[in-house]
């Protein structure tokens, strides 16, 4: 089954997304900081099908995580979907310009979530 990396510092959101994905049979990797997420992506780059990324992390902004992933030859091809409560058009535009595949707003609408995950993987 496909592996998905979740980079999310909020334990409730992390558990919710993890539970949604594992119920459908996905294998999940987790990181709670930007640095940990980048390292996990680099270490597992050949196995990860998708990265779900929160924008507000304790150590760095999600946009910087996207830029770092897209600048690395080993992780550049892994699609990134931002999952964030920040639904401003400027946030969405900035993440897409940085290279993310899509944007899901919190609170998560399960149907929208699945549509975007399935369209990206």
Image (cartoon, helix red, strand yellow):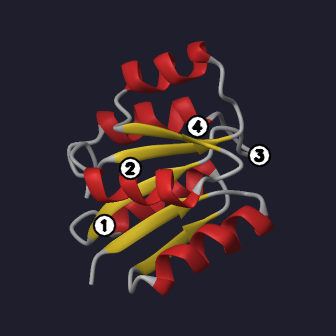
Measured in 3D between alpha carbons, the distance from the residue under mark 2 to the one under mark 4, in whole angstroms, is 19 Å
Tag 3 and tag 1, C-beta contact below 8 Å:
no
- The part of the image, by quadrant, that contains residue 17 is bottom right
Quadrant that contains the C terminus: bottom left
The answer to whether residue 38 is visible is no
Tag 4 and tag 1, C-beta contact below 8 Å:
no
Residue 55 picture location, percent across and down: 63, 38
- Mark 2 or mark 3: whose residue is earlier in sequence: 3
The one of 56 and 12 positioned closer to us in this rendering: 12
- Mark 4 or mark 1: whose residue is earlier in sequence: 1
Tag 4 and tag 3, C-beta contact below 8 Å:
no
What residue would you read off at disc 4? 62
Which of the numbered marks, if any, corresponds to residue 21?
none
Q: Residues within 10 Å of mark 4 (few under 14, many from 20)?
A: many
- Mark 2 or mark 1: whose residue is earlier in sequence: 1
Measured in 3D between alpha carbons, the distance from the residue under mark 4 to the one under mark 1, in whole angstroms, is 18 Å
Q: Secondary structure at mark 3?
A: loop
Q: Secondary structure at mark 2?
A: helix
Quadrant that contains the N terminus: bottom left
Residue at (57% x, 51% y) in the render: 35
- In the image, residue 109 sits, relative to residue 14, either above or below, namely above
Residue 88 picture location, percent across and down: 65, 19
Residue 94 picture location, percent across and down: 49, 18
- The part of the image, by quadrant, that contains residue 72 is top left
What residue would you read off at disc 2? 116
What residue would you read off at disc 1? 48
What residue would you read off at disc 3? 58
């Amino acid at each position: 089954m496909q592996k998905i990396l979740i980079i999310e510092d909020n334990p409730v959101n992390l558990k919710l997304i993890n539970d949604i994905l594992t119920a459908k049979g996905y294998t999940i990797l987790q990181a709670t900081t930007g640095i940990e997420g980048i390292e996990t992506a680099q270490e597992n780059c050949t196995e990860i099908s998708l990265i779900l990324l929160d924008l507000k992390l304790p150590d760095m902004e999600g946009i910087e995580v996207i830029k770092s992933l897209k600048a690395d030859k080993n992780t550049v091809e892994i699609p990134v979907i931002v999952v964030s409560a920040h639904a401003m058009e400027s946030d969405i535009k900035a993440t897409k310009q940085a290279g993310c595949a899509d944007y899901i707003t919190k609170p998560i609408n399960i149907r929208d979530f699945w549509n975007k995950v399935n369209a990206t993987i």
